[in-house]
Amino acid sequence: MKPLLMYIFSKVFTKVKSKTVLSLLFVFLSAVLSAFLDALTVTAVLISVTVGFYGFGTVDFKQLGGDTLEQFQGFLRSLIMHGVVGTALGGVCTLVGEPQNLLIGEKMGWDFIEFFFRMAPVTIPVLGAGLLTTVLLEKTKWFGYGDKLPEEARAIIEAYTEEADKNRKQIDKSTI
C-alpha cells in the first residue's frame, strides 16, 4: 500500500504547481476522508507518506542539505498540518466522523443523513473558514507556512515517478 501512496502523492506533488492549491487539496481531501474514516487513520497515512519522502530507496532527500532541505521539510510540515486540520474539519460533519458524533446521533435519534443536514449550518461554514484560513496562511507565510517545493526536490520526485512508471507492471497500473 505504501508504494502506491508514494506514487500517488509523487504524481500530485509534480502535477500541482501551486502550493496554495496543493494545500487546499490536502485540507479538502483529508476532510472528506475523515468524514468516513477515523481522523487518526487519515493522519497516519499522511505521516507514513511524508516519512517515505525522506528516502525513495536509493534516492535520499537529505542529500539536498542546507536551506533547500529546510525548505523541503517546511513544505512537508505545512502539508501535514493542513491535512490534520482537514481531518478535524471533516470529522465533525458526519455521524461516523468522530466517536462523539455517534453518541450525539444516538441521543438525538438521528441517522447518518439527518445528522449531516442538522449539523451542516455549523460544520459547512467552519469547513469554509478552514479553507480560507489555509489560503491566508499560505499567502502570508505566517507561522512557518508557505514554503514551496524546492526545484531540486521536485527534480528528485519527478525522477522517482519516471522510474516508477517504467517499472510498473500491468497489475500495478490497474490498481489506480
Image (tube, rainbow, N blue to C red):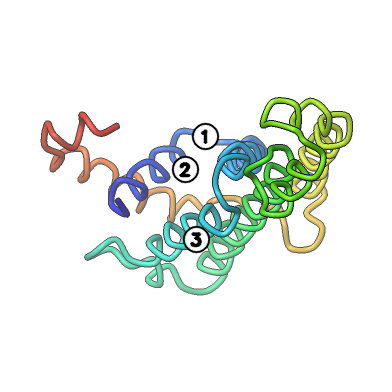
Answer left or right for 166 relative to 85.
left
Q: Crowding near pointer 3: few (<14 within 10 Å), some, many (20+)?
A: few
What type is the residue that disc 2 sits on?
A: Phe
Tell me the residue that label 2 is attached to: 13
- Which residue shows up at 22% across the image and 44% down it? 164
Question: Would you identify the image quadrant in which residue 12 lies?
Answer: top left
| Res 166 label | none
Q: Position of residue 61 (x, y in %)?
A: 39, 66
Of tags 1 and 3, the one toward the viewer is: 3
Q: Nearer the viewer, residue 89 or 144?
A: 89
Where residue 71 sits: x, y (%)?
58, 62
Q: Nearer the viewer, mark 3 or mark 2?
A: 3
Amino acid type, callout 1: Val
Residue at horizontal 79 percent and vertical 49 percent from the top = 137
Tag 2 and tag 1, C-beta contact below 8 Å: yes
Quarter of the image containing the C terminus?
top left
| Residue at x 62% of width, y 43% of height | 96
Q: Residue at 29% of width from left, 61% of height from top?
A: 56
Please, what secondary structure does the residue beneath circle 2 have? Answer: helix
Which element type, helix, strand or loop, lies under badge 3? helix
Mark nearer the N terminus (1 vs 3)? 1
Marks 2 and 1 sit apart, C-alpha to C-alpha, by 6 Å
Disc 3/disc 2 C-alpha distance (Å): 19 Å
Q: Secondary structure at mark 1?
A: loop
Which residue, given by chain and number where applicable, does mark 3 sit on?
44
Question: Could you say where residue 125 lies in the image, as x and y percent from the top left?
Answer: 86, 33
Residue 57: % across, % down: 23, 64
Q: Amino acid at mark 3?
A: Ala
Q: Which residue was labeled with disc 1? A: 16
Above or below, 54 relative to 8: below
